[in-house]
Amino acid sequence: MTPIKTCVIGVGLGGLTFHIPFVLALPHLFTLHAVMERKPITPGGKLQERFGEDAAKGVVIHNSFEAVLADPEVELVVISTPSETHYDLAKHALEAGKHVLVDKPVTAYFAQAQELGALAKSKKLVLYPFQNRRWDSDFLTLKKLLDLPADDPQSLGTLYEFESRFDRFRTELKGTWKDLPLPANGLTYDLAAHTIDQVLVLFGRPAKVTAMIENIRGLGSKEVDDAVIHDLSTLPPRAAASGVQPTSFTAILRGHILSVRAPQLRYVVRGTRGTFLKYGVDIQEDQLKVIAHPTGIVQDGMYGVEPEDIWGTVDNLDADGSVARSTWPSTERGTYVELYENVAAVIREGTEQAVKWEESAEVIELIELAYKSAREERTLAVPPRS
């Protein structure tokens, strides 16, 4: 496979943490041909500051997006810029004949996501959404638990409630573009783009949405939310293998900026035979922020391995009615690298996308419904898939 000549747009946290390391870690699949940095202070720019002279050697630094589009060597454009810019940048890149990988949220509006999908299809180009948290260690481990047969001693039975949280404690604004009242800003677009996507993967499209969204700290613009609760109700309820038949199933997605807890609560999953409880988040982001060299992603045996002190627990109902607690170990490593491996296979070999564009467009559709629900203070029906 000829390595894909790639240009990463944006050398902030996203580009330097979630994209450039994987391009550099997979030289048999990608070549970091260029980055876009408008005003680099040094010849090698932020790329060299973070990963050294060798990593920056031969990499072109484009000072404008127009220069990127005009570069005939660029095959894949990776967009890791402020969220409001994703639609315009992706559209222009597709029109210029480039494949595109877009950070989440993919767009501000569902209609924009649909338009981009149609454009990519018409030009026979790959348009890939960066839903990396499908490869979180805790999410992969949870999927393994939910796949247990009904007669397994640790089975949760028939699920009736799924709670997923991304909580933090921060009393001040970050002082970045994320604080500004711009399209696709706020905690819902930032983190619910992950939790909604995970719910769609596990359980499918909900029937109803009820949301409470606010700026609970009262800092900055009230239009930029920092506390969210989304209830996604799926109907009909999940069928029971035996015993009690729940009459409903609800996914509760929460994100709070004033949560005093360490580690933070991540999952609570309740079924007729047990409850799964998990604290702490996937460690890949923290590892990527400090990794000495991108080769560590594939060579370090501890990359993506969750520490035992944040493994989940399962409380199960025994035959005598008592409750027994056991550990559910995070045996599944976090593997964001698999997303990039799939991107390469899709572009070079026509492999099916592990994350389809339509799936991330659906996330944006549900986010828009959640904001409408919060504004109108009512539950909204989710229309059938178009």
Image (tube, rainbow, N blue to C red):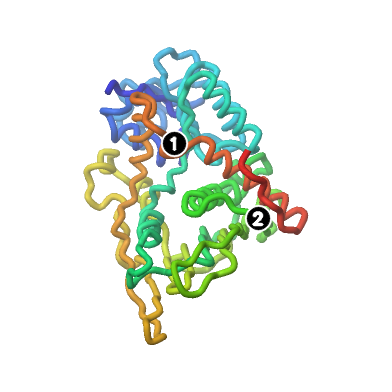
Asked which secondary structure carries label 2, the reply is strand
> Badge 2 local density, few (<14 within 10 Å), some, or many (20+)?
some
> Badge 1 local density, few (<14 within 10 Å), some, or many (20+)?
many
Residue at figure coordinates x 30%, y 23% from the top left: 3
Q: Give the image location of residue 240, x and y in percent.
A: 48, 67
349 left or right of 215? left
Q: Which mark is residue 15?
A: 1
Q: Give the image location of residue 19, x and y in percent.
A: 40, 36
> In which quadrant of the rendered image does the C terminus lie?
top right
Residue 10 visible (yes or no): no
Question: Cα distance, mark 2 to mark 1?
Answer: 35 Å
Q: Which residue is label 2 attached to? A: 208
Asked which secondary structure carries label 1, the reply is helix
* Pick the front one: 122 or 301: 122
Q: Mark 2: which amino acid?
A: Lys
Residue at figure coordinates x 36%, y 44% from the top left: 336
Camera-near label (2 vs 1) is 2
Residue at figure coordinates x 44%, y 29% from the top left: 8
Q: Mark 1: which amino acid?
A: Gly
